[in-house]
Amino acid sequence: MFKTNEYFDGKVKSIAFETNEGPATVGVMEAGEYEFGTSTVEYMTVTSGEMDVMLPGETAWTNFKPFETYIVPANVKFKVRMKGDTSYRCLYR
């Protein structure tokens, strides 16, 4: 069974599912800037568009393009921003 999630007044939407690698979500984000919190390690892969990311302890944004992955530690907050609509896949560990 899939579980759908919606955040930031519908500007971020995802579908949760199980993979051979563990729990995952696929989703889309409207252009904008958002802050998220983690409870597990997250492996975020951009699947279309581009995503700028500000990880904890960083002072500069890092840009990720399609099929590039970044890792977010557990129990932190991080920021993302997009100039256009962007899709992603997230694996939770």
Image (spheres, grey):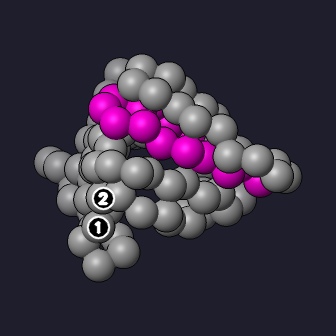
Residue 11, disc: 1
Q: Secondary structure at mark 1?
A: loop
Residue sitting at the far bottom:
9
Tell me what residue is drawn at x 34 percent, y 71 percent: 7
Looking at the image, do the residues carrying marks 1 and 2 touch, with CB atoms under 8 Å apart?
Answer: yes
The residue lying at 76 percent from left, 47 percent from top is 60
Q: Secondary structure at mark 2?
A: loop
Q: Is residue 16 magenta?
A: no
Q: Relative to the observer, which residue lies in front, 75 or 67? A: 67
Amino acid bearing label 2: Glu
Counting from the top left corner in percent of width and height, residue 88 is at 36, 38
**Marks 1/2: CA distance?**
5 Å
Query: Which residue is disc 2 drawn over?
Result: 30
Q: Which residues are magenta?
A: 41-56
Question: What's the amino acid at mark 1?
Answer: Lys
Residue 20 versus residue 53 in the image, above or below:
above
Front-lying residue, 39 or 10: 10
- Give the main secondary structure, helix, strand or loop, of the magenta stretch: strand
Q: Is residue 44 magenta?
A: yes
Residue 82, compared with residue 87, is above or below; it is below
Residue 81: percent from left, percent from top: 50, 55
